Amino acid sequence: MDWELYAEWLAQHVAHARSRWRNVVAAVPRHTFVPRWWTWAQAAPGPYGSAVWEACAGPSDPDAWAAAAYADRSLVTRVGPCHADDARPGGTTTGSPTSSATLPGLLVQMFRHAVVDEGLDILDVGTGSGYGAALLAMRFGDDQVTSVDVDPYLVAAAADRLDRAGLRPRVTAVDATGPLPGTWDRIIATVSVRPVPVSWLKALRPGGRLVTTVAGTGLTLVVDATPDGGAEGRIPWDRAGFMAARTGPDYPPSVAAAIEAAHSAQAEHVTVGRYPVVNVMEAWELWSMLGVTVPGIEHDYREEGGVRTAVMVHADGSWARATNSSPDGPAYVHQGGPRRLWDVLDDLRARWLRDGSLPVYGATARVAPDGTIHLRRGTWTATIR
């Protein structure tokens, strides 16, 4: 594979001509880090959490390998406990992604927020494929970069692929939500957390910067260490979403049963909504504001035969189902449990229309020493625990 031409094309699309990341992206063979991956193969909507994934093997189709590896998109490398490396080409599995090679443009965005200078020590949380660690090591040198992941296999595979690319940063298997093996000037996480792990704050040197994302939202958190052991900064206008940090081989049991139950449940409360059905997960500002206001909501959205259905469920037993038969038609809303989740959503949509935006993006952020995140924008405040 003449990968250099593909890498140059990718670099042109994720970094402007004067960016210091332009040549770095062009110099790293991304295909080396994703020899196999999973593609979503489900042809029609089905039960929540039952997405079918098909294994792809790069060496068996070099053209498809190059097209996938050098596109600015994420490639899923692990579904549930199943690594793509262990799957036969064309083999399938079901479940939710648990690791991926992050789209290069998003990595560059996170690195820019970190404002990394020469000579600073960097912790990359969420090794995954190893591609992010490769970019950092290529730019700043092996000795400046440590990368950690909870999955020993991913760590071993990434270390091997880094070595083949001529890069040797420190890569180790660590549950990053617990104690960390050192201190750093920059911590850049490609997993989401809520709240910020105390270990990250303790590992951040004076004057250091942390860049991560808030679980259950599309918010990036950019904060600098403060003398009291906390950090201060902001929520930039950029949107980003990463898988939540996990402490074991898979995430806890899914909410599939609750989602499926909500699709057919008899409601305690039936109304006509104020607005059409919306796919919340595709409406980043709305999703993020809802994730701050009522944390822990799981979403499902389906379109079949012209009917659009959105479902929301919460661990406290609250659920909502909204259905309409046309994009602009009214939403027929069924709700149950202790909270009216769709009413909360519609209240946020009303605020969005009234003010032209929601206050969560652009907010200032203060992280307390215990990891609690305090947000403020104007008179609006919120606490993320």
Image: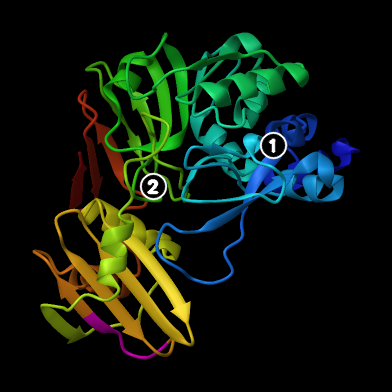
Element under disc 2: loop
Rendered-image quadrant of the C terminus: top left
Q: Position of residue 335 (x, y in %)?
A: 17, 74
Look at discs 1 and 2 and give the one toward the viewer: 1
Q: Tell me whether the residue at label 1 lies in contact with that at label 2, contact meaning CB atoms closer than 8 angstroms.
A: no
Q: Residue at x 33, y 14 (%)?
A: 179
Give the amino acid type for the residue marked by disc 2 in the picture.
Leu
Element under disc 1: loop
Name the magenta segment's main secondary structure.
Answer: loop
Q: On the rendered structure, is 56 left or right of 212?
A: right
Q: Position of residue 366 (x, y in %)?
A: 26, 34
Q: Is residue 56 above or below residue 190?
A: below
The span shown in magenta is 328-333
State which quadrant residue 75 falls in: top right
**Residue at the extreme right of the image, as rendered:** 2
Q: Which mark is residue 219?
A: 2
Give the amino acid type for the residue marked by disc 1 in the picture.
Val
Q: Residue at x 23, y 51 (%)?
A: 295
Q: What is the total number of numbered labels drawn onto the structure image?
A: 2
Of residues 256 and 336, the one drawn nearer to the viewer in this rendering: 256
